[in-house]
Image (spheres, helix red, strand yellow):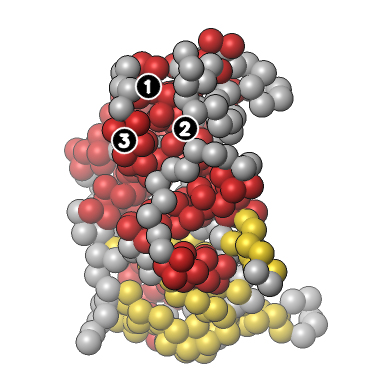
Amino acid sequence: MVHFLEAERVSKNYQAGGGAPVQALDEVTFTADSGEWIAIMGPSGSGKTTLLNILGCLDQPSSGSVRIGSTDISKLTRAELVRFRAETVGLIFQQYHLIPHLTALENVMLAQYFHSMTDEAEARRMLEHVGLTARASHLPSELSGGEQQRVAIARALVNDPKIILADEPTGNLDASNEQIVLDLLSGLHAQGRTFLLVTHDERAGRCADRRINLEHGRIVETVVFTAEENEDFDEVLEELWMLRESAMHHECSHFTEMQKRRLVATMSRIGLLKMAGSEVDFTQAGESRARSVIRRHRLAERLFMDVLSIRDDAAVESNACTFEHILSPEVTDRICTFLGHPATCPHGSPIPPGECCGDGAPGEKRSSESTRGRAN
């Protein structure tokens, strides 16, 4: 089978200050198909950005080969790399890299200039595509971080690249703008775009079709999970959270013991849970994800019972289980604010506070009206 992208035993060495060479990548091998979204994940210093720079024709490997389409880019000269990058690759960076004295429109047109010739109408269409028509004449200093990143995305798209490479595109954004950018990238992917996304953000990683985990310059694991599998992970995290707080109300459990053991083993392998003998506990990443799931679920219960006056337990539970997997952080915070930052769900279990609840102790901003239990 011929893949759109093939990296074969790619290594990259750097000479650091006359000392021993530093190996940033160590014989990395993987493939990507046209239209696939791959998240490249790993800790700082694992080689993620080095790999992206090689795939994006910004650097060349010390050894190994990289083929994109029918071109082995590891054999191209510097001048040929520049031309191939302009014609084939769209790049999105964490720092945006917008020219400060050019408007949003001119920054997008700059990519056209390096590709072939400028087309103002097409550049405006790209800005419209990312929701920035009204900001076309603004300088980067007059745009928010989220707007600057969307200009960078429009610039990456304007030459209709075959592959889009993004290096921590949500790393400098707040939760609200992060969701806007992820939604935008998801929409582009749905159109058939090929994406390689470097990120340390678990939520961004879950948007991808596949995850490649790097550690010390080597691929330690390639992870592929469906949306349904991710929902199963969320439910295990939810159960463990409730077990820790000794919650009597049990939400959305349908696993057999065998299924749960397999899920726990997988979640331990991918860094959501940790095991010590027969004891299972959260990792930091797992606890953060569990907290988010619990918060969405219990706020949804409040919304259905307090605002929509749904009193049927089964209906509330079913709808809350759906909402816990699809609510964005921005919408979750809006629901929390609308409800008056409730401290508990209708069953009396605590709702983890979010950023919208302020910097005080949990529940400090919350209305006493919204802390009532089922009895009211």
Question: Looking at the rendering, which quadrant does residue 32 occupy?
Answer: bottom left
Distance in Å between CA atoms under marks 1 and 3: 12 Å
Query: Which mark's residue is nearer the viewer, 3 or 2?
Result: 3
Mark earlier in primary sequence (3, 2): 2
Query: Which mark's residue is nearer the viewer, 1 or 3?
Result: 3
User: Could you tell me if residue 333 is visible in this image?
Assistant: no
Q: Secondary structure at mark 3?
A: helix
Label 2 packing within 10 angstroms: few (<14), some (14-19), many (20+): many
Three-letter residue code for mark 1:
Met
Q: Residue at x 53, y 87 (%)?
A: 27
Q: Which mark is residue 305?
A: 1
Mark earlier in primary sequence (2, 1): 2
Q: Residue at x 45, y 29 (%)?
A: 299
Image: 133 above or below 190: above
Three-letter residue code for mark 3:
Ala
Question: Looking at the rendering, which quadrant does residue 248 occupy?
Answer: top right
Distance in Å between CA atoms under marks 2 and 1: 11 Å
Q: Which mark is residue 298?
A: 2
Q: Secondary structure at mark 2?
A: helix
Q: Which mark is residue 72?
A: none
Residue 205 image offset from top left, x and y in percent: 45, 57
Q: Which one is in front, 84 or 255?
A: 255
